[in-house]
Image: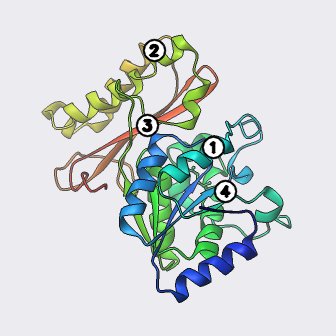
Amino acid sequence: MLWIRSKSLLKEHVQGFRRQGKSIGLVPTMGYLHEGHEKLMQVARRENDVVVLSIFVNPTQFGPLEDFAAYPRDLARDRRVAEKSGVDLVFQPDKEEMYPTPLEVTVEAGRMETVLCGRSRPGHFRGVLTVVSKLFHLVEPDRAYFGQKDGQQLALIQKMVEDLDFPVEIVPVETVREEDGLAKSSRNVYLTEEERRVAPELYRALSWGKAHWQDALYTSDPARLVHEVEKRLQAVPLFRIDYVELVTYPDLKAVTELREDQTFMLAAAIYLGKARLIDNVLFGGVSERNR
Ligand code: PAF
């Protein structure tokens, strides 16, 4: 497995792969790899000749009061996980390599980045879209793999690729969960034993919403469904709700009526101790489309 830290060396290898006619799958991450990432790498391994994993804790997607400095890092472990998952090349640049000069030009999304997480994390998705664009230009992947857990991120990246004609297929991969339902996340490491015990209530509340969305009570009044989910989250004393929102998917628009032929995303973010946890469920339409 190659471990590369410079953009120029990465480009040389990418050109080599291209000359040999090999397809490239990219798995962009911020490291501290967990089973969710392993799943992305597994699917990428199955579908491509070459798998490139990027590890970069991207400073531009963290707000000034967020956990950039504290974000968990363990490169030795990441190396073992990547090796085991059959990754061919790891690209692990430092901040100076990725951003040699202050950024003047960035990728922004407008409406779609102002809802859900974008409301409490202004600028976050600008940072994500900008770094993902850079990775697409550097790696020139045929396919790129993103987890459904970050549903808004995935929708925004898909829309960016569509609107800006990036020649890459975005592959959504289903959320990997602990046995009790908690979505795997690098940030779960922040949870104390007590917080970890109640954390699955987030998914439980969203799953309740997914099980009841077709009830007559809610189809004509979706706000009521959101309110019911909110009530369930409020009942967990350690949770502080950031948001619960129901939107159409993947265009992230407000919902006035729940219809069978449309896909919806019910999403929530909560603060739990030092962690901010997000999760979502999809239902209706063609929601079972993930790998
Ligand atoms: O999902 C993540 O880990 C990050 O937002 C990403 C896509 C690697 C961009 O930094």
Q: Name which of mark 4 and mark 1 comes first in the sequence.
A: 1
> SS class of the residue under badge 2?
helix
Q: Label for residue 121? A: 1
Residue that label 3 marks? 279
Measured Cα–Cα span from mark 1 to mark 2: 26 Å
- In depth, the one of 225 and 220 nearer the eye is 225
Of the residues under marks 1 and 3, which one precedes in the sequence? 1
| In the image, residue 142 above or below residue 207 | below
**At label 1, which amino acid type do we have?**
Arg
- What is the three-letter code of the residue carrying label 2? Arg
Q: Position of residue 184 (x, y in %)?
A: 46, 35
As helix, strand or loop, the secondary structure at mark 4 comes to helix
Residue 136 occupies which quadrant of the picture? bottom right
Residue 207 spot, x, y in % from top left? 29, 31
**For the residues carrying marks 4 and 1, which lies nearer the camera in this image?**
4
Mark 3 in CB contact with mark 4 (< 8 angstroms): no
Question: Which residue matches tag 4?
Answer: 127
Label located before the other in sequence (3 or 4)? 4
Residue plotted at (51% across, 77% down)? 166
Q: Amino acid at mark 4?
A: Gly
Distance from Cα at disc 1 to Cα at disc 3: 16 Å
Q: Residues within 10 Å of mark 4 (few under 14, many from 20)?
A: many
Q: Nearer the viewer, mark 1 or mark 3?
A: 3
> Which mark's residue is nearer the viewer, 3 or 2?
2
Q: Residue furthest left?
A: 216
